[in-house]
Amino acid sequence: MIVCLCHRVSDRDIQREVGSGTCCFEQLQDDTRVASSCGSCLDCAREVFDAALQTRGGCHVAAAAGGALAFGA
Ligand code: FES
């Protein structure tokens, strides 16, 4: 499913970013540009991001595995 039409970001793109260690939404935006133009996808993008993060077990899992910084998940 395409989440962001402006930048062609899909739910799978967001899930892949979270799986590779992204644990804050701003980092996701830097990497994918999601929700950085018209902004109409912001709520959906955040929902997909939060769900993916929860599925991954939060930020501390990535940090423990040598990934990105840990935020209070
Ligand atoms: S649809 Fe995502 S910024 Fe426009």
Image (cartoon, rainbow, N blue to C red):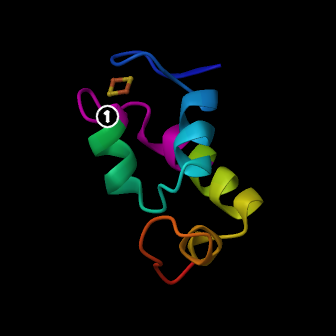
Q: Is residue 34 above or below residue 29?
A: above
Numbered range of the magenta stretch = 32-47
Q: Is residue 2 magenta?
A: no
Residue 28 is left or right of residue 1, and the answer is left
**Quadrant of the image for the C terminus?**
bottom right
- Residue shown at 57% from the left, 71% from the top: 59
The kind of residue tagged 1 is Gly
Disc 1 under 8 Å from ligand 1? The reply is yes
Query: In the current view of this chain or complex, which residue is farthest to the bottom?
Result: 72
| Percent of width and height locating residue 33 | 30, 33
Query: In the current view of this chain or complex, which residue is farthest to the front?
Result: 66
**Quadrant of the image for the N terminus?**
top right
Mark 1 element type: loop
| Percent of width and height locating residue 28 | 39, 46
How packed mark 1 is, by other alpha carbons closer than 10 Å (few <14, some 14-19, many 20 or more), is: few
Residue 29 is left or right of residue 10, and the answer is left
Q: Is residue 27 above or below residue 23?
A: above
| Percent of width and height locating residue 8 | 43, 15
- Residue shown at 32% from the left, 55% from the top: 26
- Residue shown at 59% from the left, 67% from the top: 62
Residue at image mark 1: 39
Query: In the current view of this chain or complex, which residue is farthest to the right?
Result: 55
Q: If the picture is divided into quarters, which one holds ligand 1? A: top left
Q: Is residue 40 magenta?
A: yes
| Percent of width and height locating residue 57 | 72, 68
Quadrant in the picture for residue 11: top right
Tell which of 61 and 36 is nearer to you: 61
Tell which of 3 and 64 is nearer to you: 64
